[in-house]
Image (cartoon, rainbow, N blue to C red):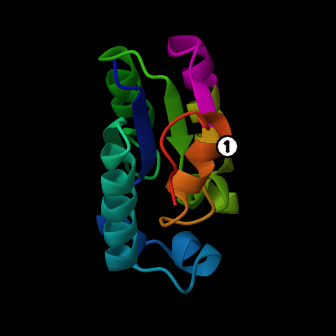
Amino acid sequence: MSPSMLTVGLDPALVDDAASSRAAFPEIDAEAVRAGVAAERARLEERGFTVDVCLLDYGRTAEAVYRAALSGKDYDIVMIGAGVRLDPALTPLFEVLVDTTRELAPGAKLCFNVSPTTTAEAVRRWWPERKPLV
């Protein structure tokens, strides 16, 4: 059976409109996020992973959306994106995501990328026995 992965991050449609995201990541816009997520998902799927993507808003519905995603399937790996983790304004949301993961997917490995194009690298740290991710 293929290992399953949930990638969770901010909805790229919101990135360009949020002052905190623009300040935390001035060089990354919505199109860069979309392209990076799509490319990394394709890389991982080529190597046998089943990859689901969960896109969140800045907090109004984020926890409910994330809970629904985690409740729908058992995941081997959960990757929480840099857009949530590295924007100081989103620290409370990051904490909710970690705690919710511990509650609903206690057996899942957590991994963290540093940009939309480093997800496969983050997965490789926790799932090295898969085909090479380079």
Q: Please tell me whether residue 14 belongs to the stretch shown in magenta.
A: no
Foreground residue among 122 and 7 = 122
Residue identifier under label 1: 125
Residue at 67 percent of width and 60 percent of height: 86
Residue at 60 percent of width and 45 percent of height: 124
Under circle 1, the secondary element is: helix
Quarter of the rendering occupied by the N terminus: top left
Pinpoint residue 116: horizontal percent, then vertical percent.
Answer: 48, 64
**Can you say whether 53 is above or below 50 in the image?**
below
Region rendered in magenta: 99-110
Q: Can see residue 112?
A: no
Residue 48, by quadrant, is top left
**Can you say whether 16 is above or below 72 in the image?**
below
Q: Residues within 10 Å of mark 1 (few under 14, many from 20)?
A: few
Residue at 34 percent of width and 27 percent of height: 69
Residue at 58 percent of width and 77 percent of height: 25
